[in-house]
Image (cartoon, rainbow, N blue to C red):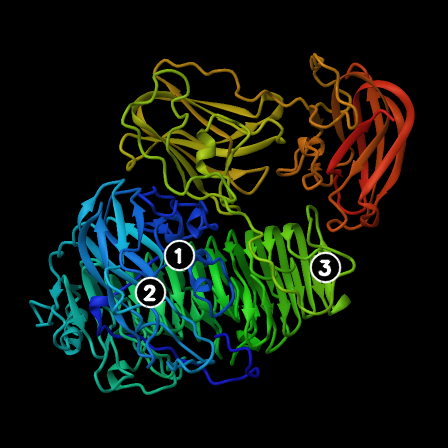
Amino acid sequence: MADHTTPPHRPPRHRRHAGLAALAATALAAASITVVALTSTATPARAAGLSPFDIPGRGATVPFVEHEAEEAAHTGTRIGPDRRYGTLPSEASGREAVTLDAVGEYVEFTLTEPADAVTFRYSLPDNAAGTGRDATIDLRANGALVKSVPVTSRYGWYYGGYPFNNNPGDTNPHHFYDEARTFLGATYPTGTRIRLQVSSTAQSPTFTIDLADFERVGAAIAKPAGVLDVVTDFGADPTGATDSTAKFQAAVDAGKAQGRAVWIPTGTFTLWDHVVVDGVTLRGAGPWYSVLGGRHPTDRKRAAGIYGKYVPGGGYSGEIRPHEANGPSRNVTLRDFAIIGDIRERVDEHQVNAIGGAMSNSVVDNVWMQHTKVGAWMDGPMDNFTIRNSRILDQTADGVNFHTGVTNSTVTNTFVRNTGDDALAMWAQNVPNVNNSFTFNTIGVTILANHLVSYGGRDIKITDNVTADSVTNGGGIHVANRYPGVQGPTAVLGTWTIARNTLIRNGNSDYNWRFGVGAIWFSALNEPFQNPTVNITDTDILDSSYAALHWIEGETNGINLNNVRIDGAGTYALQVQAASRVSFTNVRATRIAQANPMHNCVGSGFQITQGAGNSGWYTATPYCGPWPEPQWGNGPTSPPGPTPTTPTPNPTTPPPTGGNLALGRPATASSQNQTYAAGNAVDGTAGSYWESANNAFPQTLTVDLGAVRRVDRVVLRLPAGWERRTQTVAVLGSTDGSAYTTLAGASGRVFDPAGGNTVSIPLPAGDRRFVRLSVTGNTGWPAAQVAEFEVYGDGTTTPPPTTPPPTTPPPTTPPPTTAPPTTPPPSGNLAVGRPVTATSHADVYVAANAVDGNTGTYWESANNAFPQSLTVDLGATQQVSRVVLRLPPSAAWQTRTQTLAVLGSTTGSTYTTLKASAGYTFDPATGNTVTVTFPATGQRYLRLTVTGNTGWPAGQLAEFEVHRS
């Protein structure tokens, strides 16, 4: 859904699904990074770009470990990085790969976990006829040949404009890569060297390797009791030699009639047409064992697929045969098998998708979808449909599309890569889509259009996803009134929650528009937004190929960005090509390629409301002119948070017998916000903390002590400088991690900075291995928060606090003294790096930010609570006559006036006024800097007292500098 040359209305594009002719070349894959060892004369392994699997707490949990070819030892040629559409590296994960073009050349991966199977992503050249070529590549373990693996280019190489063709003489070649999977024949241990090596160039002159995903598949799932077997009961052919469509249809019809599940045993089954399901469970021995595929040999619009019944007058307007009518199907479960098709071209009218039709109250679980037109094109109206724990790879069009009247439905914990159109999409054509969600998915390399998109819809949720590498005509997240039938009641309406997503190398050049598309972009092509609430929060936009944020095609409104990090953009932070009303709070932009971070040719039509904490993206004089060439690679190469992506394994030795039994132990939580992961609560420092998802009580935090221990007390801590709050907490215990008993009932626990923000909860002495906190309320923030979760017993005693209680006094109370340094303070800014305290702070905007020498960080007091003060201890009495106050630099905050006074003290108890209270204007035109002078005086403590701020109802300072003169 990305043909930007068309007018607002165009024919709907119904997606197909697929068959399985070339099962010997079946494929699939994924995307991440692991550095591997060198071998002989191979090119050393080295780091590449940020991987979607580097992001903790977001995206899908997958069963494989991914290794990038360019990071592995190899004797080939490293290609890329390059993001230009139509180049081989542009479609590689991380925009880099390794090309092998001679006999003996290889890429060698070193296993970091045991594995018995591999999926690798590769590209072979097309042939002159555009029908592709077949070849093999050797797979070796520690140098010994394991097998030759078939590879092909029959499922890649498309040309021309939408909907594309297979003519190599046309323009715009793309969709270069495919994926092959194979068992290794044994389980190889960690450290095994697995090599993909060229044995002949007769069938293909080159083999480009992008990555390899290694996993431990294990044995097939055993056949459950009481099921109907498509082979033994209905005669389906597990060799794939004959068409089994009728046998499968008879089996699922009988399953519905008898109320029994239908079993697909190990085998490769050919289906020349849809199997229509309703009121039945269809399950297999696992997606590596039970494989469906095939395509009708003469009627090419018929191919393997599992379909629900169509709804009369619904999203599908093509031919409906009698057994496909009177939908939607209901109460369907599809699980533990693969649909690997044989679709090699794109014809939108063909229903050759892996899963389709309409299914309400139904679940797709652990299904592998590959080489079909669309993984799942669902034509509503339908309700309560879930896809989870699945893989969708190598599609000619979308990964998933919820089309027409799909409600209360979700795709979650699913891995998607190499789709020829939108990876996960919703399209509310003519009938509203309502309350659908895409959550905890990982999406890599979307060839055309968007990773995540909803065309219209009400109350949509897009949360906790990771997306990487969009190639052309789209971005990472798209919110739009676009495409036919999206207007009025089907348009963007209600409250949209777009939260905790990470976008890596998203956005790209649109080959029709001839300019870049943003990583997150908004369109109102069909009609203006009608005052929805679109909340984009806690989001990281990293290394965008063009702009990070983009508005185009009609007026939008109701867009609120809060706590958004933009780190690296090939052109602009903001690309404004249409009017909009947008609020920005704590939106920080760094490493923007253009000196002017905003492109805006609509002037005052783009209305900005600024809250606190913005930096790096705003200018009062935005650029409007020719499009610049993008500058790529500005983003981070390491993940934004320290939390590891894999859980800490249980140690083989018991925890120590003394002290905090929970220290360093595995901890899990029901949820986490941003990088505030469960592990922070057991790391021994109260400066880091766990925070749950917001506005979603109850929440739990559980620690595994590693063995059953005698437990009689827990101690809970928050960071020392936080304001007083009460959390409603219960404590539970378990010996097996399954059955829990209540040790301390739910009660309000007061965390008071005067007492070190520490709570001790006595428990009845008893044996427990797992100790759990259940939090149901918090007066200070709408989430559970714990900096340290300490567990004691076995005769241990509680040590003194790991972090001292706060030193911030109210203005009338003297701060504690600090011993003078043994060396005199430096000249210049005497306050840099010195101890500093504040009467309060908001969120993470602590006092220390004001003396760290960095104007990109800042202190902010509690809101709506003047007066507030900030006090710095110079360590010894110094002659001072000037303070310099700074806010984030000129490209960030708008003009504001803060009313403040400067006070001084030699003892920290008695303060005198050095400069009376007055209004001081922080103006971006002069660097957002204020200098306050006063008669030279000897002072050790300098205090600012803030009583007003025209820009935000709090005291705010990025830097508090103190100078001699």
Position of residue 889 relative to residue 584, above or below, is above
Badges 1 and 2: C-beta atoms under 8 Å apart? no
* Secondary structure under the numbered disc 1 in the rendered image: strand
Q: CA distance from mark 1 to mark 3?
A: 48 Å
Residue toward you, 255 or 903 = 903
Q: Position of residue 507 (x, y in %)?
A: 54, 63
| Residue 753 located left or right of residue 204 | right
Position of residue 435 relative to residue 766, above or below, is below
Residue on which disc 3 sits: 608
The residue at the point 67 percent across, 39 percent down is 857
The residue at the point 43 percent across, 81 percent down is 163
Q: Amino acid at mark 3?
A: Ile
Mark with earlier residue (1, 3): 1
Q: CA distance from mark 1 to mark 2?
A: 11 Å
Residue 907 shows which numbered tag? none
Q: Amino acid at mark 2?
A: Thr
Q: Position of residue 724 (x, y in %)?
A: 61, 30
Res. 896 in view: yes
Mark with earlier residue (3, 2): 2
Q: Position of residue 244 (x, y in %)?
A: 15, 75
Q: CA distance from mark 3 to mark 2?
A: 52 Å
* Secondary structure under the numbered disc 3 in the rendered image: strand
Comparing labels 1 and 3, the label whose residue is closer to the camera: 1
Position of residue 78 relative to residue 175, above or below, is above
Residue on which disc 1 sits: 77
Residue on which disc 2 sits: 206
Position of residue 149 relative to residue 800, above or below, is below
* Secondary structure under the numbered disc 2 in the rendered image: loop
Give the farthest residue toward the right: 935
The residue at the point 11 percent across, 56 percent down is 225
Q: Residues within 10 Å of mark 3 (few under 14, many from 20)?
A: few
Q: Quadrant of the C terminus?
A: top right
